[in-house]
Image (cartoon, rainbow, N blue to C red):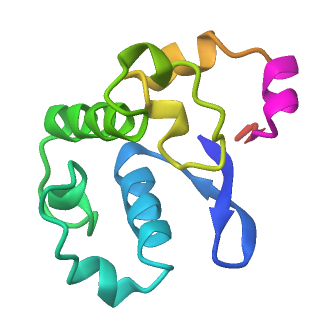
Amino acid sequence: MKVGIMSKDGHKEVDLNRRQAIRERCLNCKGWYHKEVINCIFTHCFLHPFRTGKGRQNSTRREKAIKQYCHSCMNIQVGEVKKCTVPDCPLFIYRKGGVEKALKNLSLKTLKHIGAVFLDSS
């Protein structure tokens, strides 16, 4: 799914799967320096094991890590995760689990209101 997210040069379009979303979030955290992502010392971060986006990864653990990261971002308040208003975050559409659940609950009118840009891949 193509999604507009924040990047080093402003907004950009990316084909966003969970692996790519984590990679983009880590790049954002480290100021878009690839070497900083690889050498990240924040081992307590839920996304740390998945930061490089390379190698064999357990998809169930990756999905759980995204949920845990979003919960920690919202001060461990599960109910606040669904109220997140940061659509530029690459994890936004995966914050509640499956992407289908996230998109099902959001209308285009709501997305325009909060500034998210979802692009049709067809």
Quadrant placement of the C terminus? top right
Q: Is residue 52 above or below residue 122?
A: below
Q: Is residue 40 above or below residue 66?
A: below
The verdict on residue 109 being magenta is yes
What residue do we see at 12% from left, 63% from top? 43
Kindly identify the residue that appears in the image at 75 percent across and 37 percent down.
120
**x and y, in percent, of residue 34 in the image:** 38, 84
Is 100 or 51 nearer to us in this picture? 51
- Observer-nearest of 30 and 35: 30
| Magenta span main SS | helix
- Please identify the quadrant where the N terminus is shown: top right
Q: Which residues are magenta?
A: 108-117
Q: Position of residue 76 (x, y in %)?
A: 31, 28
Q: Is residue 10 left or right of residue 100?
A: right
| Residue at 37% in and 33% down | 75
Q: Quadrant of residue 74?
A: top left
Q: Residue at x 43, y 68 (%)?
A: 29
